[in-house]
Image (cartoon, rainbow, N blue to C red):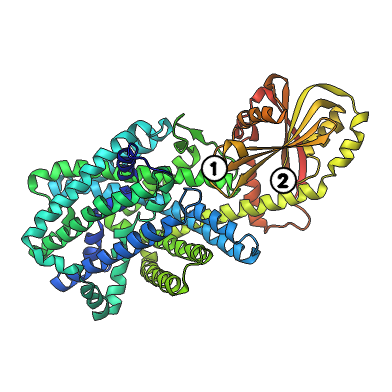
Amino acid sequence: MSVTKQKLPTLLLGAIGVVYGDIGTSPLYALKETFSGHHALPVIEANILGVLSVMFWTIMLLVSIKYVAVIMQADNRGEGGSLALLALVSEMTAKRPKIKWVITALGVFAAALFYGDSMITPAISVLSAVEGLAIISPNFKDFILPVVILVLTALFFIQKHGTGVVGLAFGPIMIFWFTCLACFGVISIVHSPQVLWAINPFYAYHFLSADPWISFLALGAIVLAVTGGEALYTDMGHFGKYPIRLSWFSFVLPALVLNYFGQGALLLQNPHAIENPFYLLAPAWALIPMVLLATAATVIASQAVISGAFSVASQSVQMGFLPRMEIRQTSDKAQGQIYVPFTNWTLYLAVIFLVLTFQSSSNLAAAYGIAVTGTMMIDTILIAFVVVAWRWSPLLVWPLIGTFFVVDLAYFSANAMKIPQGGWFPLGVAMISFTVLTTWKRGRKLLFEEIARKSIPMRVVLDDADNMPRVYGTAVFLTGPGEGAPASLLHNLKHNQVLHERNILLTVIVEDKPYVTKGNRILVDDLGKNFFRVRIFYGFMEMPDLPAALELCASWGLPFDMMSTSFFISRAMIVSAPKPGLMKWRERLFLSLSKNALNAADFFKIPTNRVIEMGTRIEI
């Protein structure tokens, strides 16, 4: 994305409002959980400085260097995120199928982990914000859960209306949020400036080496300071590299560091402030405004994660990992603003379940982190393939990637210790999601192979075409990537015993890139005897619209009149073969997913009064 001086302020405002919601609300709970969580640390000066030092250098290494400096260079035609990175690496390893299979499995599991993370983030963020009510007055403690549920319910209910209008307010609110973080942090640091010694990595080394087991367990909470760091790469396509990098280094990073160090300075002065160092950092008169501001900030963080889940679901459908589902475009200006009802309400039920089950941000912190660290570790593996392909110097690549991987592995292992306390939830969600994604992909592959095996060559149809009576109009037969005759065409010939004046074999192809330019959208082959094979290309970030795409065929000398065009679609009735290609339970899952898939006509935006469905029985 090219950035002009005129666009830069808008992009900076948008980036601050959307990209940093998750990592920007981590100060609400990260330091608190390190000292008072399931593996609490004594609130003494050595631990405070040690934890702050580890936290600071983790942010610098994993966010500033790994994501902002290195991984953001691996954009897929401007887009970022695990699936975009997977598509990029898959393209690079296309000629090495075994490596590509492993890479695909890792990338899909990273996407599956994101679903677990997207359920926990709204719950822990809003809970940690509303828990400030208990700091204002203990009498408000009983209102925390009802308020949290009310806020989250309202958030998920507005999704169907789109977030364009709400998004305009995100930037100013988050700017005010980060400004408050920095100001309250500076005020506290002034009273205990010795906290700044924590910038020295010696304190991190001393903390980690003094008691390796205790410090290892502490990593499970310290990592909460970088949750959301991967969003800088995921949202790159919306704002561009430069605005994200500029806003991070010039504004967001300093505000976060100042607030963490401010909380540390407060603990040096008053160890009992560990009850809630974030809110106790603010003066008494500012508590109520800060609770309201924190709630707004966490809603924004939750909105960014929900939008990300919609995007991952849409990409998964386009890349063949999920069945067709309803995806609504909520803006006629911004292509990325979509609403996926199934994903929205699945997330909502899971988030409310988490709130009612865990009931506090401290309890939820035990479940948080395993998905994030797993995703970060997979991103490190994927980027290793990219930098090797870039032919970077081995003297730079292997120490850099090795350092990233060791740090990621340490944090992932520390979070694995929290699996019994709640880490089982995101892992369970990830395993279910991974199973669904891979089962659908495998089942589709078997389905297409069976269709190709049973199909007859188009040459046979063309040889007999002159003997068939013709009727007025154009027939469009949706077909897969194979070269054989579509099943819908054969069924039409069998039952109606006629051909249309003009016959189109239409194939939709999703490429390993986010967008396809208008000039590369259509490819037309004349098969003779008024038969044409039309291929329509989309990127994995695009929503298909076949009538709109077919209008482009006019430039190929193939104009379309929708009123005289009929679309023939095969509806496959899938049954089990004597020797099924899937295990029984996976086969049942695939059949269930297939039955609940959105109708092809609705998904491809084909007018329903122009559609004719032809049933066909297929064994897999």
Q: Quadrant of residue 505?
A: top right
Tag 2: amino acid: Pro
- Extreme residue in the right direction: 467
Nearer-the-camera pick, 136 or 438: 438
Question: x, y percentage for residue 81?
Answer: 46, 52
Residue, disc 2: 481
Residue drawn at the location 42% of the way across and 71% of the way down: 396
Residue drawn at the location 27% of the way across and 76% of the way down: 208
Nearer-the-camera pick, 527 or 140: 527
Residue, disc 1: 515
Question: x, y percentage for residue 298?
Answer: 29, 45
Residue drawn at the location 64% of the way across and 30% of the way down: 552
Badge 2: residue crowd in 10 Å (few <14, some 14–19, many ≥20): few
Would you say 18 lies left or right of 456 here?
Answer: left
Q: Quadrant of residue 194?
A: bottom left
Vertical comparison of 409 with 607: above or below: below
